[in-house]
Amino acid sequence: MRADAQRNRDRIVEVARALVRAKGFDAVSMDEIAKGAEVGPGTLYRHFPTKESLYDAVLEAWAGKVNAAVDSALALDAPAREQLLTWLTDYAAMLTEHKGAAARITAALGDPGSPFAAKCTTYINANQRLIDGLDSALRPGVEAIQISRLVGGVAAVVDNSELPADSMAPMLAIVADGLLAP
Amino acid sequence: MRADAQRNRDRIVEVARALVRAKGFDAVSMDEIAKGAEVGPGTLYRHFPTKESLYDAVLEAWAGKVNAAVDSALALDAPAREQLLTWLTDYAAMLTEHKGAAARITAALGDPGSPFAAKCTTYINANQRLIDGLDSALRPGVEAIQISRLVGGVAAVVDNSELPADSMAPMLAIVADGLLAP
DNA sequence: AACTATACGGAGACACTCTCCGTTTGGCAA
DNA sequence: TTGCCAAACGGAGAGTGTCTCCGTATAGTT
């Protein structure tokens, strides 16, 4: 890639990240991002063929954080319930970090054609590692994608309704208790 | 209201209901509805100032169904877990009956200014009656709006991802077990 | 039959995503 | 350094959506 193209690409992602953080994905237009990054719309679309593919780039850094969070939860010297709840809370917090991310990523969980497909497998794998790690403490038959969807659903609701972050806690507690073996 | 206006209003809602059922709320445009009802866009917007207010009219008939469902679940001669699961399943099924309804209604749960506010209180009241009916079988401190959000979240995910209806069952089972007293 | 409040319809304002294509420029080779 | 050209740029505008304004038509009353 030519040097100017690389510079522009980086600036676009940077500007987009700031705008999305401030106003939410849906409330930011591509023109606005282009203007902020001082490029034309044509340039923007040369780098990112759709708005969602730009969003995917904005969320890039997250995948690593997810794996770190599941590791640190499993490393806790605590009962399974607390490990589980710690992870669910961290996971939900990451999903609500950027407005609009939770619903989008969670909706894409089963769709390999989505621009978020790579992130989805990261999330599902993280939940699978959790299941493997917690072993027999969980109810039998629970699947990683179900956990992803449950927590994603809760996070999406809280995100959409613009609720305070701590309103997730009681709902995640219910999910956690439901996930533990009867 | 003048007779022709009433006729047009009824036809608009009828056409909108059919189109939304077939294609989902987001995929149907107001122009399309206007054409289908053989009125101009101006007439459409005279009756329904926003697209969402039209959707509210489309969903009108539901409120009664919700109350009937919670009654019939509570009337079951069965353990609390089964009553609870029956209701959650019925409730989720109603939310996914029209594409796009689950996320919209659930997002509006705490917002009195939403066009769906009336429906939201119906849903919350239904869950409150469930809590009162199941009495001490539920975990202490659980709130009606939390149940509404949990089930709404699950329904929204399934709706968004276009999953088969039966994929909700295991997730609702987890929620149900989490809701029952430990 | 005339009159008026009410309702109608459609052109178009405005916003948004995305495309096409003529113009400019970075980086390499002579 | 200079010249070349593939790569990148920018912006006008196509296409689609929600919603508005206002001149026209009509229902219902007098």
Image (tube, coloured by chain):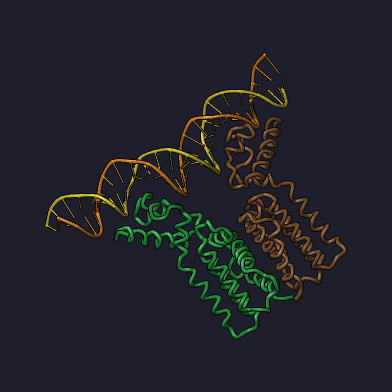
Chain colours: A green, B brown, C orange, D yellow
Q: Does residue B169 appear in this view?
A: yes
| Quadrant housing residue B28 | top right
Asked whether, in this view, residue A108 is left or right of residue C24, the answer is right
Which residue appears at 78% of the width and 63% of the height?
Answer: B130
In the picture shown, does residue A37 fall above or below C4? below
| Quadrant housing residue D27 | top right
Residue closest to the eye, A127 or B121? A127
Q: Position of residue A33 (x, y in %)?
A: 41, 55
Given the current orientation, which residue lies at the most extreme right position? B77
Q: Quadrant of the C terminus of chain A?
A: bottom right
Q: Position of residue B47 (x, y in %)?
A: 64, 38
Q: Does residue A167 appear in this view?
A: no
Q: Quadrant of the N terminus of chain A?
A: bottom left
Asked whether, in this view, residue B118 is left or right of residue A101, the answer is right
Which residue appears at 72% of the width and 46% of the height?
Answer: B60
Residue closest to the eye, C17 or D1? D1
Asked whether, in this view, residue B48 is left or right of residue B140, the answer is left
Q: Position of residue A165 (x, y in %)?
A: 58, 68
In the picture shown, does residue B173 fall above or below A85? above
Given the current orientation, which residue lies at the most extreme bottom position? A77
